[in-house]
Amino acid sequence: MPNAVKTYVRYVDAVSLRVGRFAMYLIFAIMGILLYSSISKTFFQPSLWTLEMAQFAMVAYYLLGGGYSMQLGSHVRMDLVYGAWSDKTKATADAVTVLFLIFYLGVLLYGGFSSTQYALKYGEKSYSSWAPYMAPIKIIMVFGIILMLLQAVAIFFKDLAKARGEDLGGGDLS
C-alpha cells in the first residue's frame, strides 16, 4: 500500500481512538442527567430538560463512538458461513461490503448537512416544552457521521491490504 494510505489509516485510527475514548465517558453524563431527573421528580419540581438532554447525550455517545466501535470490530456481524472462510476471503468480503456502508454513510452525511444548514439558518428548535435549539446536536451528529465515514474508508484500506497479504496495522489500541 502507498505511504499516503498508511498515513491516512494511522491518523484516522488515532482520531477515532481519542474521540471514541472520550465518548465512552458520556455514559456517566447520561447517568447523571437521568439520576437528577429521578431525584427532581421525586423530591422537587420535575425538570423539563432532563429527558431530552439525556437523549441528546445518547446521540452524541452513539455517533461519536461509532468510528471507535468500527475500529475495534465491535459491530454486529452475522456469521453463517463467514467463520469458516480464510482470512483473505474474509478480508475480500469485508472490503466489498464496507463499500455499501460508505455509500450509506455518504447519504446520511448529505442529509445531515442539509438538516444542519436548515437548523442554523432558521434557528430550528425542538417541539418540546423545553424547546432547545437543534443546531448543536445536529453539528455533533454530522461530526460523528464524518468520523464513521473516515473510519469506514480506513477499514476498506485495511481489508484491501489484508486481502493482498499485507498488513496496515490497527492491532494495538492502547
Image (tube, grey):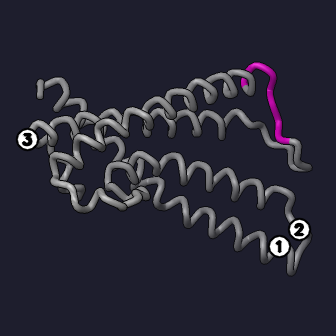
Give the magenta part as a residue range.
Answer: 120-126
Q: Nearer the viewer, residue 134 or 157?
A: 157
- Which image quarter: residue 133? top right
Q: Nearer the viewer, residue 138 or 171?
A: 171
Q: What residue is drawn where x is 28% and y is 38%?
A: 95
Which circle's residue, 1 or 3, is located before the other in the chain? 1
Which mark is drawn over residue 165?
3
Please, what is the three-letter code of the amino acid marked with disc 3? Answer: Gly
Q: Nearer the viewer, residue 146 or 101?
A: 101
Q: Which residue is mark 2?
A: 46
The x and y percentages for residue 164 are 11, 36
- Vertical arrangement, residue 136 with respect to residue 73, above or below: above
- Where is the N terminus found, in terms of image quarters? top left
Front position among marks 2 and 3: 3
- The answer to whether residue 38 is left or right of residue 20 is right
Is disc 2 placed on a helix, strand or loop?
loop
Q: Which residue is mark 1?
A: 40
